[in-house]
């Protein structure tokens, strides 16, 4: 039995919204690479500098059926965060809705378009956080596999004490000063370090976040120093 198309916004499925129909889903596409093109007199061709992947819009066609409550529909789309499309049921995008939705048209003609502004990368909706515990360790390593098709920038939570050195695939990246805190959260994508209470801990971290990216496939994260636990999230990523 085929289930009609649906989307999930922040763990709430459109299938649970009475009278809301997802008429069509956006195509699965690769994000555009932003570029800077420079032309130099006397030189053939041009110089193209890649600036990273661009965010873009995904359009969802919606409709109404018997028993709808327009306030419930408005509330459902008055959101931002994580979206899952049923044609990619195991992955999610980070999204926001910036453009106006014509709910008057939706009420009158029972159809409308919702444009979701999504960030270029998608993440696994089924992979969970990985937890690694250590007992009386002064050094160690963990294996993490990026199951995606492009490098990822994970979030790593390290619990320990003293000075901790963190390496990726044999290259030392970070030195953590954990003399005054037991836990430091390294948000590689955000390029910031936090405590468990959300306060910034950047002054306790030395190293270049740009160097801590996980290529697709297997990766080794190693440490020296007193570490009791490592948690890692968002380690797989796709375009």
Image (cartoon, rainbow, N blue to C red):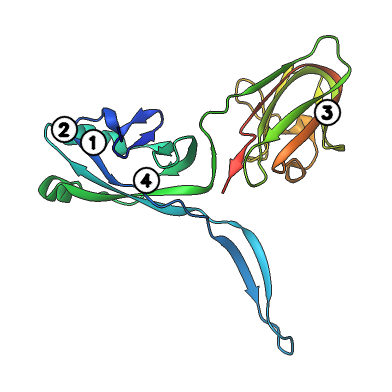
How far apart in space, not on screen, are marks 3 and 4 (Cα)?
40 Å
- Point out the frontmost of discs 3 and 4: 3
Kindly check if marks 4 and 2 are in contact, taking CB atoms under 8 A apart as contact. no
Outermost residue toward the bottom in this view: 42
Q: Quadrant of residue 53?
A: bottom right
Relative side of 61 to 193, left or right: left
Residue labelled with disc 4: 97
Viewer-side residue, 197 vs 135: 135
How far apart in space, not on screen, are marks 1 and 3 (Cα)?
48 Å
Q: Earlier in the sequence, mark 3 or mark 2?
A: 2
Secondary structure category for the residue under label 4: loop
Q: Earlier in the sequence, mark 4 or mark 2?
A: 2
Outermost residue toward the top in this view: 135
* Horizontal and vertical percent position of residue 16: 27, 27
How far apart in space, not on screen, are marks 3 and 2 (Cα)?
54 Å
* Horizontal and vertical percent position of residue 58: 40, 51
Residue labelled with disc 1: 73
Secondary structure category for the residue under label 3: strand
Residue at 81% across, 28% down: 176
Viewer-side residue, 191 vs 65: 65
* Horizontal and vertical percent position of residue 23: 26, 46
Q: Earlier in the sequence, mark 1 or mark 3?
A: 1
Residue at 69% across, 43% down: 216
Residue labelled with disc 2: 69
Classed neighbour count for the residue bearing mark 3: other residues with Cα under 10 Å, few (<14), some (14–19), many (≥20): some
Residue labelled with disc 3: 222
Kindly check if marks 1 and 3 are in contact, taking CB atoms under 8 A apart as contact. no
Kindly check if marks 1 and 2 are in contact, taking CB atoms under 8 A apart as contact. yes
Relative side of 30 to 199, left or right: left
Kindly check if marks 3 and 2 are in contact, taking CB atoms under 8 A apart as contact. no
How far apart in space, not on screen, are marks 1 and 2 (Cα)?
7 Å
């Amino acid at each position: 039995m085929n289930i009609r198309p649906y989307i999930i916004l922040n763990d709430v499925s459109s299938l649970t919204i009475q009278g809301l129909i997802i008429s069509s889903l956006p195509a699965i596409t690769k994000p555009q690479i932003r570029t800077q093109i420079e032309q130099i007199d006397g030189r053939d061709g041009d110089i193209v500098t890649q600036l990273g992947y661009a965010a873009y819009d995904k359009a969802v066609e919606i409709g109404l059926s018997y028993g709808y409550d327009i306030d419930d529909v408005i509330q459902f789309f008055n959101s931002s965060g994580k979206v899952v499309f049923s044609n990619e049921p195991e992955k999610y995008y980070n999204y926001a809705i910036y453009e106006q939705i014509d709910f008057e048209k939706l009420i009158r003609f029972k159809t409308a378009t919702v444009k979701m502004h999504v960030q270029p990368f998608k993440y696994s909706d089924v992979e969970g956080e990985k937890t690694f515990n250590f007992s009386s360790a002064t050094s160690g390593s963990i294996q993490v596999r990026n199951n995606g098709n492009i490098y990822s920038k994970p979030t790593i939570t390290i619990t320990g004490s003293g000075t901790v050195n963190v390496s990726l695939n044999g290259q030392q990246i970070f030195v953590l000063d954990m003399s005054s805190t037991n836990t430091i959260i390294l948000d590689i994508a955000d390029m910031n370090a936090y405590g468990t209470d959300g306060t910034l801990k950047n002054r306790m971290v030395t190293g270049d976040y740009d160097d801590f990216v996980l290529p697709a496939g297997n990766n080794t994260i190693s440490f020296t120093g007193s570490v009791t636990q490592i948690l890692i999230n968002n380690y797989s990523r796709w375009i």
